[in-house]
Amino acid sequence: MTIRRFPEGFLWGGATAANQVEGGWKDGGKGISVSDCARHHLDVDVTNYKKHNTVTSKDIEEALKTDDESLYPKRHGSDFYHHYKEDIKLFAEMGFKVYRMSIAWSRIFPNGDDIEPNEEGLQFYDNVFDECLKYGIEPLVTMSHYEPPINLVLNYNGWYSRELVGFFEKYVTTICTRYKDKVKYWLTFNEIDSMIRHPYTTGGLIEDRFPGMNWEQVIFQAMHHQFIASALATKICHEIIPEAKVGCMLTKLTYYPYTCKPEDVLKAQQDMRATYCYSDTQVFGEYPSYLLARFKNNGIIIKKEPGDDEIMRNYPVDFVSFSYYMSSCTAASTEGLDISAGNTITAIKNPYLPSSAWGWQIDPIGLRISMVDLYDRYRKPLFIVENGLGARDEVNTDGTIDDQYRIDYFNSHFKSMLDAIEYDGVECLGYTSWGCIDIVSESTKQMSKRYGFIYVDCDDYGNGTFKRIPKKSFYWYKNVIKSNGECLFEN
Ligand code: BG6
């Protein structure tokens, strides 16, 4: 029997983001970020994502009036800020080779436009990286994951303002200089494409602050600024850390035509392009012609500064990272078809696929399809930096957590990932499962939507001991890493 395992040096690990895991929202001189002002809605309607993520100026006013953490769960997260040593020790016990995390911009520059960085914030990440390196865990750092300081929203209108490019350059120069001996793998913006779906957390954009303006124009202008900032961050990072590898990060939304009707196939092609246009820009260093066509057809005029095209062209990314959770169907007409929820989208339900409790359709083969598509398109190494199952976990009376459903999810996805590597020739640097320790969910801001191998005792209102408990999947993943995937094929 042929032994199947992942390539030597494959980077197995887990991922989190500061805004969802850290807590300590006002500790150590940290400023308030957009996510600290994002309220949760427990009347969750998974088919109406917009409802949970439309933020108004009034919402921000309310948020800033209170120190409440029960309605603003990202303020407490999983309290990694105070538990990081214990958490990284548990990651090491699982055998992590890499830990994807983000730096909260507002810990380094509390207001975003400060003259000097906050030393206590810088020291915190020094401590975190040292702790990782102590166990031989490579940090993979996202520079911006839904964490712009709120001051940049209130006084600059978020990424719509060109001034943010300069503030971001300063922030990137600061963190790259400080951590140059500790961090080799970097991502610029988490899911830059999500600006379209949640402009507030990604871009610090609040629609009522742009009266009478074309909202799509506002979003794409802000995104243009992020593209420039991302290219400049790549440049800065390479100058300061010559051996650094810098990646873009894309939400991999994979669409299948609902039927083989040419109209449905065309719609699927269009929907796929609508997700690729962002990584196309970051990999090829220019806006793809079909995105320019969309701008033209929708009357969108991007204001550029002289030199912008050169910046985009000269500093493309080194690798392509992405999140993959699910696939969806699409059709020219949705009439009479069942609609399903997804990662900040809704789409047509695929009758061949099961769904998670939050309606996301579970599709391991879709991961292989996605990897092949991305690799064929870009010919750059891939890194799967988010994948996993959001589920409700129960603690048994004996204190154990039997999350076999999560093991089943990973098992099928890992096999599919290996198929893409072994049979389809895809180069993949590594894999970090999302929310390797339970964290606050982005879309619904729930703690009860859990992804982790490690349970955190905290409910949707922030009540609990914050005690960490390894789940059944913890021991299973440890074995996967130890055997480099070989155990997946044992009966
Ligand atoms: C990704 C985001 O799109 O999806 C994460 O980068 C997010 O921040 C993840 O947490 C899962 O989504 P959710 O809504 O289940 O937390």
Image (tube, grey):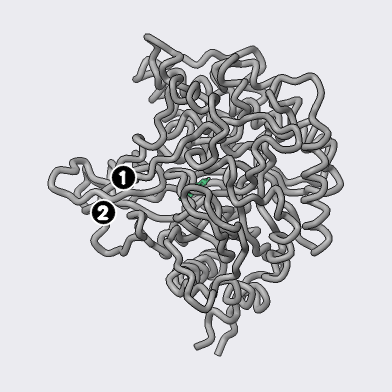
Percent of width and height locating residue 218 = 46, 18
User: Which mark is on residue 349?
Assistant: 2
- As helix, strand or loop, the secondary structure at mark 2 comes to loop
> Does residue 328 appear anywhere in the picture?
yes
The furthest residue to the left: 336
Q: Which amino acid does label 1 sit on?
A: Asp
**Quadrant assignment for the N terminus:** bottom right
Percent of width and height locating residue 27 = 71, 38
Task: Please indicate whether residue 127 sits to the left or right of residue 31 in the image.
Answer: right
The answer to whether mark 1 is within 8 Å of ligand 1 is: no
Q: Which residue is drawn at 71% across and 50% down?
A: 82
Q: Which of 208 and 65 is in front in this view?
A: 65
Q: Mark 1 points at which residue?
A: 45
Percent of width and height locating residue 178 = 84, 38
26 vs 310: above or below = below
Gap in angstroms between the C-alphas marked 2 and 1: 16 Å
Q: In which quarter of the image is residue 466?
A: bottom right
